[in-house]
Image: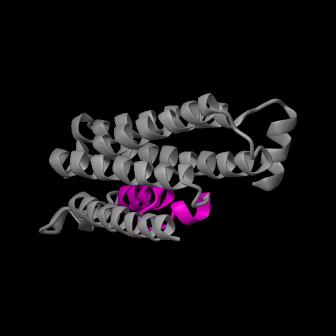
């Protein structure tokens, strides 16, 4: 991944471009999950959603390496990097909430919690906590996408139809609880940083 990021930098690719590509993948993932409810072939849309999520994880990793090589960023660059991430989070998770056997309300609640946890991370970075310290928590962006991807793969197996609680419901509850725990953990760490 480091070699790929260096190669992309040599071609003039910026972190903003990678963030926009990630946003497009996130939007495609969200619409793919919505397609599982209406399609005659939901398995195809579960696979597409999982693939788009995995590709977005790759974009996040690339964006991290590109940021590492370009430590000085303007306010405009930060804005145009953060905004696509928030759009991606919202569309992917809300779309997952509208998927087959899922819950729109749980999807909306999880999306709001994810966005607020990202806000806490950005606040920590702005106050000088450092990117790694500000991004702590059990339910980060990559964790959320990995959880959705794994759930999508599980939905391909017939045994999931016989479960009393649908797999997407369980995944969204795990995500929601994890995001709330992440928000609290980042808040307490931010308070500790303010006191030092």
Give me the residue at 23% from left, 42% from top: 98
- Asked whether 122 or 106 is in front, the reply is 122
x%, y% of residue 19?
Answer: 59, 37
With respect to residue 117, does 163 lie above or below? below
- Asked whether 25 or 134 is in front, the reply is 134
Residue at far left of view: 164
In the rendered image, residue 42 lying in the magenta stretch gets the answer no
Magenta span: chief secondary structure? helix
Give me the residue at 40% from left, 43% from top: 89
With respect to residue 86, does 46 lie above or below? below
Task: Give left or right: position of 100 versus 52.
Answer: left
Note whether residue 192 is visible: yes
Hey, which quadrant is residue 20 in on the image?
top right
Task: Give left or right: position of 28 versus 16.
Answer: left
Hey, which quadrant is residue 86 in on the image?
top left
Hey, which quadrant is residue 12 in on the image?
top right
Residue at far front of view: 195
Colouring of the image: one colour
x%, y% of residue 43?
Answer: 35, 48
Task: Give left or right: position of 147 versus 133.
Answer: left
Give me the residue at 24% from left, 48% from top: 107
In the rendered image, residue 148 lying in the magenta stretch gets the answer yes
Q: Which portion, as a residue range, is magenta?
A: 131-154
x%, y% of residue 56?
Answer: 55, 45
Task: Give left or right: position of 3 versus 153.
Answer: right
Give me the residue at 29% from left, 37% from top: 34
Question: Where is the N terminus found, in terms of image quarters?
Answer: bottom right
- Asked whether 108 or 162 is in front, the reply is 108
């Amino acid at each position: 991944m480091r070699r790929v990021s260096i190669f992309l930098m040599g071609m003039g690719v910026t972190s903003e471009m990678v963030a926009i590509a990630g946003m497009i993948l996130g939007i495609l993932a969200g619409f793919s999950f919505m397609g599982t409810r209406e399609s005659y072939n939901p398995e195809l849309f579960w696979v597409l959603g999982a693939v788009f999520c995995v590709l977005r994880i790759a974009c996040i990793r690339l964006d991290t390496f590109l940021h590492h090589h370009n430590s000085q960023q303007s306010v405009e660059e930060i804005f145009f990097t953060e905004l696509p991430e928030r759009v991606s989070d919202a569309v992917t998770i809300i779309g997952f909430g509208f998927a087959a056997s899922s819950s729109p309300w749980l999807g909306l609640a999880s999306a709001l919690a994810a966005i607020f946890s990202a806000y806490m991370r950005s606040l920590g970075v702005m106050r000088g906590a450092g990117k790694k310290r500000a991004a702590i928590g059990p339910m980060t962006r990559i964790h959320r996408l990995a959880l959705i991807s794994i759930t999508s793969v599980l939905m391909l197996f017939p045994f999931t139809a016989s479960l009393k609680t649908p797999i997407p419901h369980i995944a969204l509850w795990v995500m929601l609880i994890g995001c709330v725990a992440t928000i609290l953990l980042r808040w307490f760490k931010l308070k500790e940083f303010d006191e030092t």
